[in-house]
Amino acid sequence: MQLLPALFEEDMKVFGRSINAIQELGFKKKEVALTPVSNVLMKVLREGGAYGAGMSSFGPTVYAFGEDVLDLRKIAEEFLGTKGQVFITKARNTGARIEIA
């Protein structure tokens, strides 16, 4: 697996290929198979330029990342129509904060 080295080297293409590969392994493969709409959406996003696309646990959340996130958003919105919500977010690259009131 090249996921961690790609993350360390900030290589989004290799990281994406690793995320894509995980969707085809072990129990994750079975989870994806249980949600055919999510599986097709991931494929559509990859074909639309996403470096990586995956599904959260048993779904229904599908995520994707790439260079043109606005285009990926449009692809997802067109695919889902009114049957889903699409939004853009960023990774939070800091740990948890504990605040005492």
Image: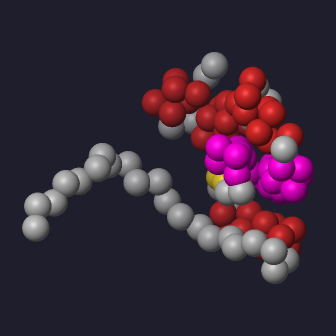
Q: Which residues are magenta?
A: 35-59
Evaluate whether residue 74 shows in this view: no
The residue sitting at 83% across, 70% down in the picture is 80
The residue sitting at 40% across, 54% down in the picture is 92
The residue sitting at 63% across, 19% down in the picture is 1
Its colouring scheme is secondary structure
In the displayed structure, does residue 8 sit left or right of residue 51? left
Quadrant where the image shows the C terminus? bottom left
Evaluate whether residue 91 shows in this view: yes
Q: Give the x, y percent position of residue 98.
A: 19, 54
Q: Is residue 42 magenta?
A: yes
Q: Residue farthest to the top?
A: 1
Q: Is residue 72 above or below residue 1?
A: below
Q: Is residue 9 magenta?
A: no
The residue sitting at 16% across, 60% down in the picture is 99
Q: Is residue 45 above or below residue 25?
A: below
Q: Is residue 71 above or below residue 7?
A: below
In the displayed structure, does residue 6 sit left or right of residue 24? left
Q: Is residue 78 above or below residue 60?
A: below
Q: Give the x, y percent position of residue 40.
A: 89, 52
For this rendering, which residue is in front, 29 or 53? Answer: 29
Q: Residue farthest to the left?
A: 101
Snapshot quadrant of residue 57: top right
For this rendering, which residue is in front, 76 or 8? Answer: 76
Q: Give the x, y percent position of residue 89.
A: 53, 64
For this rendering, which residue is in front, 22 or 57? Answer: 57
Q: Give the x, y percent position of residue 6.
A: 55, 29
